């Protein structure tokens, strides 16, 4: 019996414009009424989530920053942070600055966002942005390191980063550009979700998961039942047990309605 639903957000639960449809909200509410736990498992930082809570339910749990943070939605508080040690972060930056000139860094922290001056964010940075050399902005509150290159091929850049620092951190990517996301060693969406399930006496066979990008691969590989969205990256389509309709066709809601007889 399925007891927990773990779903990615962008490209999965959300439409391409970032919206949540009434159909999806109704399905999530029906699952809650049945006692099924829904966990939003995302690469997004907490600061990108505030506007979403009212649409998906202001309660429950979210795994943010690719497993770096467990967030209690009802309390609007961090339940757990799995940080990258400062010494490790500094070593990663030093290695990649030398190995791939032109690499720039930004840091998602438990209390905000920081970046090197040369790092070019694609979205408007927060008003409390911290900026400076990586040696100054790196501390022990970092849950995700972002490495960007403006001219490298995205998959080639990811492979190079993995080969250089994959023994120090967990690397992944969920962007169409050359942006690699790094969490503490062993920290993924899957390992953090597994901890949550253990605390609740839920086994992996009682979990169904949905995703669309390479940062979802550990999650989909761990869950007892997995769905790649029809719009997913080829590597995700290859790993998942099943294929759900595309995110813009309410694929997650469609599959959940079928699985739970809604």
Image (spheres, rainbow, N blue to C red):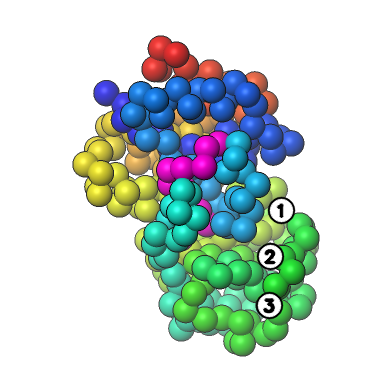
- Look at the image and tell me in which quarter the N terminus lies: top left
In the rendered image, the vertical position of residue 191 relative to residue 95, given as above or below = above
* Nearest-to-viewer mark from 3 and 2: 3
Q: Tell me the magenta residue range.
A: 56-68
Residue wearing tag 2 = 148
**N-term mark: 2 or 1:** 2
Of all residues shown, which one is farthest toward the left? 201
In the rendered view, does 254 fall on the left or right side of 178?
Answer: left
Q: Which residue is mark 1?
A: 177
Q: Which mark is residue 130?
A: 3
Identity of the residue furthest to the bottom in this view = 136
| 211 horizontally vs 219: left or right | right
**Residue 257: percent from left, percent from top:** 47, 17
- Dot 1 or dot 3: first in sequence order is 3
Q: Residues within 10 Å of mark 1 (few under 14, many from 20)?
A: some
Check the image and report above or below for 222 versus 143.
above
């Amino acid at each position: 019996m399925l007891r927990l639903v773990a779903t990615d957000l962008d490209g999965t639960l959300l439409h391409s414009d970032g919206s949540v449809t009434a159909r999806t909200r109704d399905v999530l509410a029906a699952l809650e009424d049945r006692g099924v736990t829904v966990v939003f498992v995302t690469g997004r930082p907490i600061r990108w989530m505030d506007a979403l809570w009212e649409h998906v339910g202001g309660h429950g749990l979210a795994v943010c920053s690719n497993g770096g943070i467990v967030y209690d939605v009802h309390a609007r508080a961090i339940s757990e942070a799995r940080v990258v040690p400062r010494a490790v972060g500094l070593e990663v930056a030093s290695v990649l600055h030398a190995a791939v000139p032109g690499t720039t860094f930004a840091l998602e922290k438990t209390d905000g966002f920081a970046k090197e001056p040369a790092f070019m964010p694609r979205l408007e940075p927060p008003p409390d942005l911290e900026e400076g050399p990586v040696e100054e902005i790196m501390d022990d509150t970092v849950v995700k390191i972002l490495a960007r290159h403006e001219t490298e091929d995205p998959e080639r850049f990811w492979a190079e980063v993995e080969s250089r620092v994959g023994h120090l951190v967990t690397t992944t990517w969920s962007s169409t550009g050359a942006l690699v996301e790094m969490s503490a060693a062993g920290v993924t969406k899957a390992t953090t979700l597994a901890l949550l399930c253990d605390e609740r006496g839920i086994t992996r066979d009682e979990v169904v998961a949905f995703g669309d990008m390479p940062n979802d691969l550990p999650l989909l590989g761990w869950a007892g039942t997995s769905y790649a969205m029809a719009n997913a990256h080829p590597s995700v389509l290859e790993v998942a047990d099943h294929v759900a309709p595309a995110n813009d066709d309410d694929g997650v809601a469609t599959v959940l309605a079928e699985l739970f007889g809604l």
